[in-house]
Amino acid sequence: MQSCARCGFVVYPAEKINCIDQNWHKACFHCDVCKMVLTPNNFVSHKKRPYCSVHNPRNNTFTSVYETPININAKKQSKASSEVRGHPEQNHSSSMHAIQHVSVL
Ligand SMILES: [Zn+2]
Ligand SMILES: [Zn+2]
């Protein structure tokens, strides 16, 4: 007897879908993300799991939410502020020069 890759229960031929080298109940062959029931004609497989075309992990539209440009900017900002803190004297002397230049004029 073959068991369903989703729920583990026996799959009878009448309700079997054979996809991604595994057996599924027709009702169990749904998108891993939104649970939309899929057919062998419209599913996308990724790491032996079925997905609908919207949640295809290879599109990288919903798995990369946490790598947004906002996070990248935050990393850049924290690096820049630590650099400023690392050279306080340079900033001070340059501002002194500016003041002297103005007073000469
Ligand atoms: Zn099942
Ligand atoms: Zn989906």
Image (spheres, grey):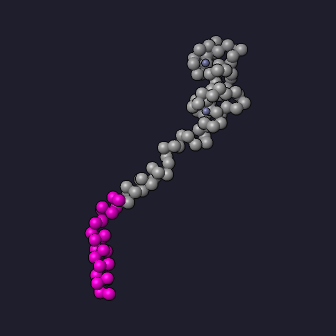
Instruction: List x then y, in percent, for residue 100.
Output: 28, 81
Q: Residue at x 62, y 21 (%)?
A: 28
Drawn side of residue 61 relative to residue 105, left or right? right
Q: Main secondary structure of the magenta part?
A: helix
Res 98 quadrant in image: bottom left
In the displayed structure, 101 sits above or below 88; it is: below
User: Which residues fall within the magenta stretch?
Assistant: 81-105
Q: Quadrant of the N terminus?
A: top right
Question: Which quadrant of the render holds ligand 2?
Answer: top right
Image coordinates for residue 22, horizontal then vertical, percent: 64, 23
> Would you say residue 49 is visible in this rendering?
no
What residue do we see at 34% from left, 61% from top?
Answer: 83
In this view of the protein, which residue sits in the foreground, 37 or 2? Answer: 37
**Rendering coords of residue 77 (x, y %):** 40, 57
The picture quadrant where one finds residue 89 is: bottom left
Can residue 99 be spotted in the picture? yes
Looking at the figure, which quarter contains the C terminus?
Answer: bottom left
Q: Residue at x 45, y 54 (%)?
A: 73
Q: Is residue 33 left or right of residue 79?
A: right
* Residue 104 quadrant: bottom left
Relative to 55, say whether 13 is above or below: above
Residue displayed at 33% across by 63% down = 84
Q: How many marks?
A: 0
Instruction: Work out whether residue 51 or residue 34 is closer to the camera in this orientation and state it.
Output: 34
- Depth order, front residue of 24/22: 24
Q: Looking at the picture, how far across and down is residue 3, in whole percent?
A: 61, 16
24 within the magenta span: no
Residue furthest to the bottom in view is 105
